Amino acid sequence: MATGTALFYETFLIIVFFLLVATAGYFFLNRQSTPTPQTNNLESRKTVEDYFIENMRVSREEAKKMAAEGVILRVSKDTTLMGIVGNIYYYGFIDNEDAFNKLLKSASDTKQGREGTIKAGDNTIDTQTSYYLNYNMTDEEIADTLLNKGKFEENFTRYNYLFMPSGPSK
């Protein structure tokens, strides 16, 4: 009787072992890899043309015309540094959020920030301010624009858009 009980437990343990291996194998083979923002496929990001189509309800042709000469990035008083960097990454102006954050902290900030400014290290990005961007700008040019070339708007809430069509500032 003792031999039959031992055989039963051995068989039971072998079956449990194979079930655990099979379950672990199933989860290993079917796991969803969660890419970090830096390893996302760049093709899955959008463009400002997509933004104009989705938010301003314009045709693809009109959106291309609107974005052809660059856009205005509007930074409201509720915007965060992570929000700015995330959006310019998502819409394809920069390709590496971490490197751009470091650049914002180390670039030359020659303009004193206004009240309610966003901090990037010791540097500042003004809120209630518009910034001209285009896809031909380097990361350094975009950082310089955000730190030094904003246009404050008294009536900032007039438009509720992140991006607006525009040409270069005159």
Image (cartoon, rainbow, N blue to C red):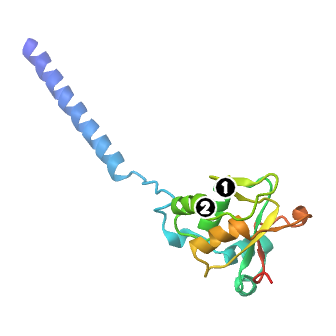
Residue at 65%, 63% in the rendered image: 87
> Would residue 21 be found to the left or right of residue 38 on screen?
left
The quarter of the image holding the N terminus is top left
Residue toward you, 102 or 11: 102
Up-down relation of residue 51 to residue 104 (above or below)? below
Quadrant in the rendering for residue 141: bottom right
Residue that mark 1 sits on: 81
Q: Give the percent coordinates (x, y) of residue 24.
A: 31, 42
Residue at 65%, 70% in the rendered image: 144
Residue that mark 2 sits on: 104
> Quick check: can you spot residue 93?
no
Q: Are marks 2 and 1 in contact (CB under 8 Å)?
A: yes
Residue toward you, 41 or 78: 78
Q: Give the percent coordinates (x, y) of residue 98.
A: 52, 58
> Would residue 106 be found to the left or right of residue 159 on screen?
left
Amino acid type at image mark 2:
Leu
Q: Nearer the viewer, mark 2 or mark 1?
A: 2
Q: Give the percent coordinates (x, y) of residue 44.
A: 54, 69
Q: Give the percent coordinates (x, y) of residue 18.
A: 22, 37
Up-down relation of residue 105 to residue 131 (above or below)? above
Amino acid type at image mark 1:
Leu
Callout 2 crowding tier (Cα within 10 Å): few <14, some 14–19, many ≥20: many
Quadrant in the rendering for residue 8: top left
